[in-house]
Image (cartoon, rainbow, N blue to C red):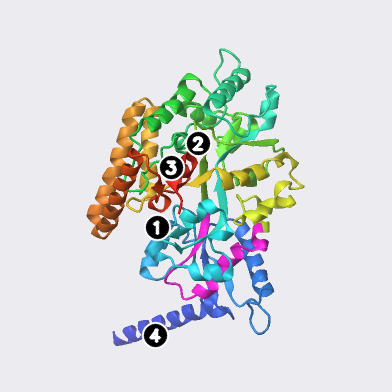
């Protein structure tokens, strides 16, 4: 029996040695940095460009080769995997996450000093993104690309019904009037509607409408959900009206029939290409797939409608450095590459949303891609929206963003299916989110002191507003209200 144990021990040692010798790092002549990202084929070209950038900028071996090797880790891109691995101390060096998914700042390295030294601080991207990339003055990420939600429209579909494309900027009355005219011309009387102004009412459209009346999902200090308000109820009621009374947006049944009926693509972009939707609310990244169609339509861009304050959402797929990485210095080179001309030109050519650096949107290659004249006029409009009307989604430190999204979406569906009135859904949304905030505080006493400090500050803000005083801008933690208070003249700027 002892020989069996000896044999097993020797086998295990041999297997371990073989595994160590065949690890990728062991076979590489330079340090390896792992990038946890999605399996997009574009990443291969981006890695090649990064290695060229390293050589061009002097990050080389004595032989003039790249000083590090960047490798993809697409298996562990899932957020839950990264968190588990991060806590265990074995995660990839660079985390490529969507924001607000990039909220686990305790697992990310503070890159503030590296960003200033290497030229990828938040001044090198869109000002609206600063609140997503930094916390308490410390930077934790830099954009890989930037998305802004606008209506991308099919000009050929509008021309088919002898209509001009809608204006770039419009209020809800204009939106509704043009929408009714469009579906009236596109759908024969007495037959089932198969053409709609845009896709179904969703949280993005309805929350932009509420924001346009000055209501965000959280208060100024992010301590309380404030959607139990008639302005959110009005936006829910508007979505219902546009769907079931005006029929300019499809219902769930309409969308289901598209997905099952022969001849329809079953996806929003296919329906848009085929003319079933005149517009879709989406980011510039939609062009990646649209360019693969045999005959892409002529495009136009319009902003989402508003009541009083024009706005839309901006977000980013950002890269951060794992706090437990042994390659922080080398990983910072990659984030500097994201701010480079080489990388931004790559994003411009691929149409993978907006490039991280706004300067790249002023080029002729961005505005008028020679192979895609059907897109001319849309690119600069998308970039301008990112720098003028776009505001990031507010995130409370006392509740996970995914929980907020889930609660809001459930209540919207209850209204759209007739299971709740807009007023009741608005009330329930706020109650559920505020219950989750209190549950977080009960489970995380360390957050209680910060919460009470901000709640006290909220009382001061409310008092100033009641007395008609201007509120110091640094009191306001919600990025939406910082913009809105300045717009209304309610802010005392620092």
Residue 107 in the image: x percent, y percent? 40, 65
| Sooner in the amino-acid sequence: mark 2 or mark 3 | 2
Q: Could you tell me if the residues under marks 2 and 3 are in contact, i.e. CB atoms within 8 Å?
A: no
Residue 80 - label? 1
Quadrant position of residue 355: bottom right
On the image, numbered disc 4 is attached to which residue? 10
Tell me: residue 30, above or below residue 342. Answer: below
Residue 211 in the image: x percent, y percent? 45, 37
Mark 1, mark 3: which one is toward the viewer? Answer: 3
Mark 1, mark 4: which one is toward the viewer? Answer: 1
Q: Secondary structure at mark 3?
A: loop
On the image, numbered disc 3 is attached to which residue? 490
Q: Is residue 91 visible?
A: yes
Q: Secondary structure at mark 2?
A: loop
Give the camera-side residue of 409 and 21.
409
- Tell me which segment is drawn in magenta: 317-344
Location of the N terminus by quadrant is bottom left
């Amino acid at each position: 029996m002892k020989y069996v144990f000896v044999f097993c021990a020797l086998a295990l040692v041999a297997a371990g040695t073989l595994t160590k010798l065949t690890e990728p790092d062991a076979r590489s002549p330079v340090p390896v940095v792992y990038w946890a990202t999605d399996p997009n084929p574009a990443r291969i070209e981006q890695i090649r460009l990064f290695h060229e950038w390293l050589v061009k900028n002097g990050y080389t071996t004595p032989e003039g080769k790249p000083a590090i090797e960047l490798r993809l880790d697409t298996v562990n891109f899932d957020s839950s995997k990264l968190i588990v691995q991060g806590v265990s101390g074995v995660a990839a060096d660079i985390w490529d996450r969507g924001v607000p998914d990039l909220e686990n700042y305790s697992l990310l390295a503070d890159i503030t000093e590296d960003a200033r030294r290497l030229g990828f601080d938040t001044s090198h991207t869109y000002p609206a993104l600063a609140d997503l990339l930094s916390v308490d003055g410390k930077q934790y990420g830099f954009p890989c690309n930037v998305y802004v939600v606008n209506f991308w429209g099919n000009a050929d579909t509008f021309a088919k019904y002898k209509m001009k494309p809608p204006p770039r900027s419009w209020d809800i009355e204009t939106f509704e009037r043009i929408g009714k005219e469009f579906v009236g011309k596109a759908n024969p009387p007495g037959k089932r509607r198969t053409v709609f102004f845009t896709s179904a009412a969703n949280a993005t459209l309805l929350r932009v409408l509420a924001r346009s009346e000055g209501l965000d999902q959280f208060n100024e200090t992010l301590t309380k959900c404030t959607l139990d308000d008639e302005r959110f109820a009005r936006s829910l009621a508007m979505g219902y009206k546009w769907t079931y009374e005006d029929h300019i947006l499809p219902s769930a049944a309409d969308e289901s029939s598209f997905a099952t009926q022969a001849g329809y693509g079953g996806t929003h972009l296919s329906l848009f290409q085929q003319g079933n939707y005149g517009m879709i609310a989406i980011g510039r990244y939609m062009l990646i797939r649209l360019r693969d169609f045999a005959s892409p339509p002529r495009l136009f861009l319009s902003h989402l409608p508003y009541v009083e304050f024009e706005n839309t959402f901006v977000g980013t797929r950002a890269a951060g450095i794992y706090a437990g990485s042994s390659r922080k210095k080398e990983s910072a080179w990659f984030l500097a590459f994201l701010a480079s001309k080489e990388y931004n030109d790559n994003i411009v050519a691929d149409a993978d949303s907006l490039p991280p650096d706004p300067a790249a949107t002023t080029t002729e290659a961005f505005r008028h891609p020679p192979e895609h004249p059907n897109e001319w006029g849309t690119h600069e409009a998308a970039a301008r929206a990112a720098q003028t009307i776009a505001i990031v989604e507010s995130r409370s430190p006392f509740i996970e963003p995914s929980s907020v999204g889930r609660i809001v979406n459930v209540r919207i569906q209850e209204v759209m299916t007739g299971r709740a009135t807009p007023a009741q859904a608005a009330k329930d949304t706020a109650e559920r989110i505020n219950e989750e905030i209190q549950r977080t505080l009960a489970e995380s006493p360390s957050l209680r002191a910060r919460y009470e400090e901000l709640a006290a500050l909220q009382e001061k803000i409310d008092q100033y507003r009641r007395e008609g005083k201007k509120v110091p801008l640094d009191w306001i933690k919600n990025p939406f209200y910082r913009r809105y208070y300045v717009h209304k003249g309610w802010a005392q700027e620092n």
